[in-house]
Amino acid sequence: MSKKFDVVVIGGGPAGYVAAIRCAQLGLETACIDKWINKEGKAVFGGTCLNVGCIPSKALLDTSHKYEEAHEKFSLHGISTGEVSINIADMLKRKDQIVKNLTMGVATLFKANGVKALEGTGKLLAGKKVEFTNHAGATETIEADNVIIATGSVPVNIPPAPLTEGVIVDSTGALEFTEVPKRLGVIGAGVIGLELGSVWGRLGAEVVVLEAQDNFLHLVDQTVAKEAKKLFTKQGMDIRVGARVTGSEVNGKEVTVTYQDSEGEKSETFDKLIVAVGRRPYTEGLLAGDSGVNLDERGFIHVDETCMSDAPGVWAIGDVVRGPMLAHKASEEGVMVAERIAGHKAQMNYDVIPSVIYTHPEIAWVGKTEDELKAAGESYNVGMFPFAANGRAMAAADTDGFVKIVADAETDRILGASVIGPNAGDLVQQIVVAMEFGSTAEDVGMMVFAHPSISEAVHEAALAVNNAAIHKANRKPKKK
Ligand SMILES: NC(=O)c1ccc[n+]([C@@H]2O[C@H](COP(=O)([O-])OP(=O)(O)OC[C@H]3O[C@@H](n4cnc5c(N)ncnc54)[C@H](O)[C@@H]3O)[C@@H](O)[C@H]2O)c1
């Protein structure tokens, strides 16, 4: 094995593996180190996203959605099914197969692109050297012209609810329940809490979500958040905001959680508890004292806008650096850094990164929310369109939610969009494209949208910004 590479990437998740592939495509001799061992004891690339994050959670969300549809919605279409049941072991097996296919896919892409996969642990030393320890414990030092750190993040644990085998679990454990919990507690009404709460709730668990903040989904447009809370409550999720968990006690197969809300101390007993209170950057054992790389006050690797760390030639990308902890942000940083190493002037637009919560309905947003614009004293126009007035959504019996677009009052340039409804993640991407091209709401309004399509709700919301929606009543023009 060559002991010198153009680029060594530490971490093989969506940040690291994408960076490694792009580096190799650009003609750089590249190695990618990852220490992940899957539950079969096999070294795999793909990181949290492929192994225990984005992908397996979506597999379970899809299965549970289909189950719920069969159970509750098919009869709407006149379809009778007899008794609908779910085999949890089969559901988990399908999820595991998808994960396997994708992680094997990364290995295949590495081979196809000539990336050297190094299975083991990397540690950054001074002078762009990396100490590599393989799974058998053998250590060697590798030199590189550039090092990219992409070590990701791990779930935050909180002292009031320490993980306890089989009872108190994190997002990884919540993908492996072998039966549907009767009563499921979730700490944190964030992305993970809502997605995993949805999975088990749809399969029959009684779900109680305890959220410390008073505002539900405080980062999301509050009109959307209000609609989401109403819909999730209707689906049976018991969401308690302003509820800070202060302790827990495990008794055999049960856990009693105590929490504080505006009325005082309360408690609830569950047979499973998911802790989903955020993630933190993962840098344990990563940096030698003289590596030259610094962490910021929150433990993220300090980087500039091009993802260069304080040590020249050492870059850091993904969850381990500032910005939203999103796989697609991580991958794009990986591409940007690879291009910069190859001498190109790539940059990334951090203002236009979409976020998606894969509940049903989905919630997605990009750019500014109305609340942010209002707080900043900006002058803006809002256009909204409900799916209840969209023919395709009606045909699919999927009419909850709406599209909301905000645009600059003077220039009409689109500043942001929030969607709650069917395929919200895909719909918001249309506004991502529009925003990247600096489009106005009128520009989107003048485009031709296929009929009948869910996307027409985006078209109508863009038209509504300037009071020109066709399929709903517009605001009355202000009197001059
Ligand atoms: N669909 C996606 O894109 C996706 C999916 C999963 C995870 N992620 C990312 O992973 C990261 C972690 O997700 P997450 O849901 O764990 O974090 P999060 O930050 O989205 O939500 C955590 C929630 O827990 C609450 N909380 C904290 N301490 C609490 C306590 N003691 N009692 C009650 N509530 C408490 C917080 O107020 C917060 O609302 C996020 O950055 C997220 O963007 C993204």
Image (spheres, rainbow, N blue to C red):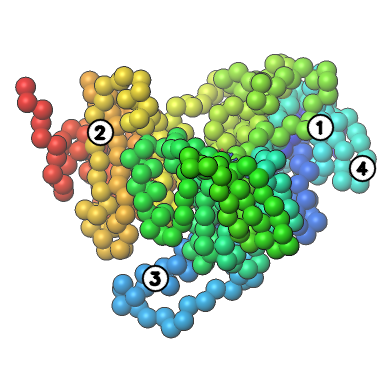
Q: Nearer the viewer, mark 2 or mark 4?
A: 2
* Lower sequence index among marks 4 and 3: 3
Q: Secondary structure at mark 1?
A: loop
Q: Secondary structure at mark 4?
A: loop
Amino acid bearing label 1:
Gly
Q: Which of the labelled discs sits on residue 2, or is there none?
A: none
Question: Image point 35% across, 30% down: which residue?
Answer: 371
Of the pair 40 and 185, the residue shown nearer to us: 185
- Residue at label 3? 72
Q: Which of the labelled discs sits on residue 137, or is there none?
A: 4
Separation of marks 1 and 2 at Cα, in angstroms = 49 Å
Q: Position of residue 366 (x, y in %)?
A: 41, 35
Crowd tier of the residue under label 4, counting other residues whose Cα lies within 10 Å: few below 14, some 14–19, many 20 or above: few
Q: Nearer the viewer, mark 4 or mark 3?
A: 3
Question: In the shown orientation, is residue 43 left or right of residue 171?
Answer: right
- Residue at label 1? 285
Separation of marks 4 and 1 at Cα, in angstroms = 15 Å
Corner quadrant of residue 404: top left
Q: Secondary structure at mark 2?
A: strand
Farthest residue toward the front? Answer: 264
* Lower sequence index among marks 3 and 2: 3
Of the pair 242 and 479, the residue shown nearer to us: 242
